[in-house]
């Protein structure tokens, strides 16, 4: 028997599944009744936990799941997910049998890919596809009506193939200026016009577009970053029609507390030198956990107070300048709330000069996840611990 409900370090992330659920319920209220929600759970559900978030999303009204790669889809199947799963990225033609075995929907964007895949298909297979259209993102996708029709006809001519949907992705939907975004939207409508859209799942809106658009959703919306309670960007904060509820918080404890004298230094490079006698706490979190070196000097919360990281962040630990002596074991919050103080993922992203997506995905699998429902722990998962306790 495998046990994953234990961890042996005083650092953990909390994922509030009620927040995930509330965000899905809220987006569904903004959409026409016939528009389905595709919950995007790629990259281990943006670092939140794939199976837990997938189950919560489906229970809260999502009709479909989306991942980046086939491996992520198979992982969900192996954990008991039977709902439809779309692989948004490119897959290898020779792996089409695997998609058929696990009932995974693939993205296709080249006729040549389908021709190669036919070499590996069995007559009784059934593989569903969504066609990806490149309207200006420049990654993958058909770029012309002729390409699109060629792919559609190739699917129609071979019985193992089934065309289920078509989609595109916006490059600037999270920016205030709408010109490029609207160009892509119009381009998408032009390209798909020749297809029998009534029978297809058509989706172009990501979280940003889903939150901003009043119409034009077609019949499905991909809900990614917004599902986790994180805004797609600061630029469109005033356009978000409901209060997003962040699901992820990050915590640790003080593992050691000491008084250093004026002139003494801490951490690599001796960059921090005490200007007076100072209490220093050690926190067992480091850049191997995703708390990157660039966060040197940023704030963390101890007893509801903002205190600054002292010196360079190490691989597994960092030090914090304390305002007084605290006992070892005192809780430390890196992302989240203590009392009246709150450190958001957006704040950390700002310190790192990046986006909240990257912060969520950077917190590594070394950090155990605790999953909450109704304010109580319903599951603890430590991805690194696989203890065989069978005799």
Image: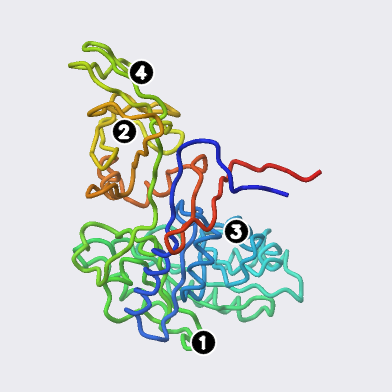
**Element on which disc 1 rests:** helix
**Element on which disc 3 rests:** helix
- Which residue is more in the foreground, 186 or 45? 45
Q: Is residue 260 left or right of residue 167?
A: left
Counting residues from the start of the chain, the first of labels 2 and 4 encountered is: 4
Instruction: Tell me, for residue 268, which label it has, or none.
Output: 4
CA distance for labels 3 and 1: 25 Å
The percent coordinates of residue 354 (x first, y second) are: 30, 45
Instruction: Tell me, for residue 199, which label it has, or none.
Output: 1
- Which residue is more in the foreground, 232 or 308? 308
CA distance for labels 3 and 2: 33 Å
Instruction: Tell me, for residue 70, which label it has, or none.
Output: 3
Counting residues from the start of the chain, the first of labels 3 and 1 encountered is: 3
Frontmost of labels 3 and 2 is: 2
Frontmost of labels 2 and 4 is: 4
Which residue sits at x=33%, y=72%?
210
> Dot 2, how many residues are within 10 Å of its Cα: few (below 14), some (14-19), or many (20+)?
few
CA distance for labels 2 and 1: 50 Å
Frontmost of labels 3 and 1 is: 3
Which residue sits at x=61%, y=78%?
162
The percent coordinates of residue 231 (x first, y second) are: 29, 60
Residues marked 4 and 3 touching at CB (< 8 Å): no
């Amino acid at each position: 028997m495998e046990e994953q409900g234990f961890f042996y370090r005083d650092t953990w992330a909390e994922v509030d599944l009620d927040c995930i659920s509330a965000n899905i319920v809220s987006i569904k209220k903004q959409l026409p009744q016939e528009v389905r929600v595709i919950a995007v759970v790629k990259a281990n559900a943006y670092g939140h936990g794939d199976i837990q978030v997938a189950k919560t999303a489906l229970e809260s009204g999502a009709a479909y799941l989306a991942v980046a790669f086939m491996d992520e889809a198979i992982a969900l199947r192996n954990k008991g997910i039977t709902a439809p799963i779309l692989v948004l990225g490119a897959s290898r033609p020779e792996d089409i049998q695997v998609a058929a075995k696990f009932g995974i929907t693939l993205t296709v964007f080249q006729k040549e890919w389908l021709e190669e895949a036919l070499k590996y298909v069995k007559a009784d297979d059934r593989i569903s596809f969504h066609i990806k259209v490149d309207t200006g993102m420049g990654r993958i996708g058909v770029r012309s009506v002729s390409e699109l029709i060629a792919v559609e006809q190739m699917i129609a001519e071979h019985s193992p193939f089934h065309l289920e949907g078509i989609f595109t992705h916006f490059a600037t939907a999270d920016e205030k200026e709408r010109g490029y975004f609207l160009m892509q939207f119009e381009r998408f409508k032009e390209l798909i016009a020749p297809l029998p859209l009534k029978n297809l799942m058509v989706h172009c809106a990501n979280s940003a577009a889903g939150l901003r658009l009043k119409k034009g959703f077609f019949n499905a919306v991909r809900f990614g970053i917004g599902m986790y309670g994180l805004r797609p960007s600061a630029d469109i904060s005033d356009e978000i029609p409901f209060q997003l509820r962040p699901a992820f918080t990050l915590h640790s404890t003080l593992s050691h507390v000491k008084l250093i004298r004026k002139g003494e230094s801490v951490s690599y490079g001796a960059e921090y030198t005490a200007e007076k006698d100072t209490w220093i706490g050690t926190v067992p979190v480091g850049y191997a956990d995703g708390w990157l070196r660039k966060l040197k000097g940023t704030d963390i919360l101890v007893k509801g107070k903002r205190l600054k990281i002292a010196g360079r962040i190490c691989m597994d630990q960092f030090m914090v300048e304390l305002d007084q002596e605290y006992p070892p074991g005192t809780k430390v919050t890196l992302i989240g709330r203590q009392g009246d103080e709150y450190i958001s993922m957006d704040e950390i992203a700002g310190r790192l000069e990046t986006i909240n997506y990257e912060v969520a995905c950077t917190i590594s699998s070394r950090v155990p996840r605790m999953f909450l429902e109704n304010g109580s722990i319903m599951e603890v998962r430590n991805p690194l611990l696989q203890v065989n306790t069978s005799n």
